[in-house]
Amino acid sequence: MSSELKIKMCGLDVKVSYGKKRALHGITLNILENKVTALIGPSGCGKSTFLRCLNRMNDTIEGALVTGKILLDEEDIYDSSVDVVELRARVGMVFQKPNPFPKSVYENVAYGPRIHGLAKSRVALNEIVEQSLVKAGLFSEVKDRLHDVGTSLSGGQQQRLCIARAIAVSPEVILMDEPCSALDPIATAKIEELIDDLRRNYTIAIVTHSMQQAARVSQFTAMFHLGNLVEVGTTDTIFTSPQERRTQDYITGRFG
Amino acid sequence: MNCFSKSYLKSLPRDIRLKQRYRAEKRFRAYGYTAIGIGVFFLTALLWSIFSQGYTAFWQTSITLPVKLDVAVIDPQNRRDKNPQILITANYPVLIRNALAEKLGIAIDDYIGLRELNHMISPSAGIKLRKMVLDNPQIIGSTQSLTVLAGADIDSAFKGKINLTVSEISRKISNRQIKWMYKLAAEGSLYKAFNTGLFIFASSSRPETSGLGVALIGSFYMILIVLMFSLPIGVATAIYLEEYARKNRFTDLIEININNLAAVPSIVFGLLGVSVFINFFGLPRSSSLVGGLVLTLMTLPIIIIATRSALRAVPISIRSAALGVGASKIQMVFQHVLPLAAPGILTGTVIGLTRALGETAPLLLIGMVAFIANYPRTLMDPATALPVQIYMWANESERAFIERTSGAIIVLLMFLAVINTIAVLLRRRFEQHR
């Protein structure tokens, strides 16, 4: 592990409530650059809620209220001067269920660059699409069917297509909300390898229910429980010598 | 496999009510078949009654005659060069009657016979001949072959719509007329031809010269207006309410009102049209514009409701996906949600349009129930609509209007079928793009 760690994103006392129900009770957590941070915890603990705060996807939920600060490169993303569209171009997201657009594979990947005007020409756009598919480890499988509809791919391919779509807008951070929960073990293994590759260029935060997955892909792990951050540290520490009893119980499968 | 499960189930000690459950299923299926059977029966009865009465309206009895354009009748004093009025006021019906009399060998002093002959020919024949002469005055003096419409009663009798076995005084055509009719038919001068007039002619008090021309144009104009106004306004309203408006008392109130509007009786919309469009804005009565606007008001709630449910049915994952790559809200709505909702919107629009096309009551109130003899050139000109024309013909007393009423219903049904077919094809296209 390199000695110089840079904080890419940082949540300071983040509280979220949906209507009257409080979902997060003040989370303070750093996401380090070019590292994979895993968010673990039992269902309903608020890890997905926290993840969705990082690119303000919670804005789309009626009645959601977020307080506290979330910094991206030391700038508060909930500040009124921040444009949410620009933020989401910098902080991409991959969802639990693969959700390609019902358009061609090519169009799925090209959509982001096109709306943000990232490609000056058709050739440049083709280049971006190809590079994104290569990075997502999908290009060799779909290069002959770029104009097939995205939803005709297998589940694992669809999820990698969604990753390619996120990569295509060159984000700095990629958020992944249980990206493998709908996939079989082989597809999961492919995505895990991919996450390890992507770490070199991107900062990644991943929510997962699988302890093994957290151990395999992440360098840092944050344990959530009932809307609180129980413990955070390097993945090695969390899985070998957790400080908190609840973490110990959860990772050994005693609850959750 | 089946065998195995049966014996396995038999060995079960408990009763899981299989028999009752299967019986309930059978019963339910029987109810379904009964319901469908009743529906099909009534639909068949309805269509059969309409088509069996109406198909004859698409054929019209015509008579082709060699007409001698006698100068002595048209212009006895030879003054037509100085006075063009002569050619307009000349007695053309007599020429046709004489041609018929000659063909049938009726003496020129048989006045009763000549009067009966007059009734065999539609009064439109004289007008047709006049137009022919005015277009080309050189033909005066020659003999021209002319095809004219038979009178309405002859037409009905020839199609078998009049019972010819009752005694002569209680039927509308005389024994002699019947004899002449069959004689002409045997010679091939009297025959049935396709009734283009049904689609071209405007209103007329005589069945053989009345048609759906004005009603078709009026209905077409109104459908255009409804489509032009209600589709964009309805879809825009639905998008605003579904995607942008905050949920609060006010939007709830709007929603309830829109839902209620869809259930308001159409005649009320007619009253609204009279007081707002005609009395307040001063738009002309009976015009396609006012009719179209009233039908637009009626169609709007249907389109809004259909569009909203179509938008709501678009999975949230698609919205998240679009927002996740940084699409703005308007890009999300127009590039992802709306295309997926298009088939549903289309269905709602077609339901609204077909309802508007078949609507009569509000049009009666704004004065579209009128005797209109000229084609409407603009949206401001008086017009009628197909269902209103059906309503008016159904009120006519003459026998020949009965088949025309059914014929008009067939035309209206065809119109609806065409719209529905287009919608199905469009919908299939939209769905292929998914």
Image: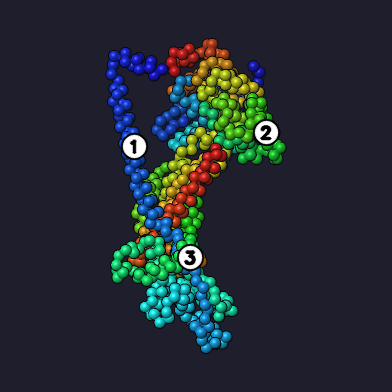
What amino acid does circle 2 point to? Answer: Ile
Residue furthest top in the image:
A240
Inter-mark Cα distance, 3 to 2: 79 Å
Q: Residue A223: x, y in percent?
A: 50, 19
Q: CA distance from mark 2 to mark 1?
A: 57 Å
Q: How far separated are the C-alphas under marks 3 and 1?
A: 54 Å
The quadrant the C terminus of chain B occupies is: top right
- What residue is disc 2 on? A128
Instruction: In this rendered view, identify the residue nearer to me: A119 or B278.
Output: B278
Chain to which the residue tagged by mark 1 belongs: B
Asked if badge 3 and badge 1 are on a common chain, one would say yes
Q: Chain of mark 2?
A: A
Query: Type of residue at label 3?
Result: Gly
Classify mark 2: helix, strand or loop: helix
Residue drawn 41% across and 50% down? B301
The image quadrant of residue B385 is bottom left
Let me know if residue A80 appears in the view. no
Please count the marks in the image.
Answer: 3
A242 or B195: nearer the eye? B195
Q: Which mark is residue B188?
A: 3
Where, by quadrant of the figure, is residue A91 drawn?
Answer: top right
| Residue at 34%, 54% in the rendered image | B265
Q: Which residue is mark 1?
A: B32
Of the two numbered discs 3 and 1 on the same chain, state the one appearing first in sequence.
1
Residue A68 drawn above or below residue B267: above
Q: Is residue B271 or residue B349 the one in the foreground? A: B349
Residue A142 pos. (x, y %): 64, 28
Q: Quadrant of the N terminus of chain B?
A: top left
- Vertical position of residue A41 compared to residue B254: above or below: above
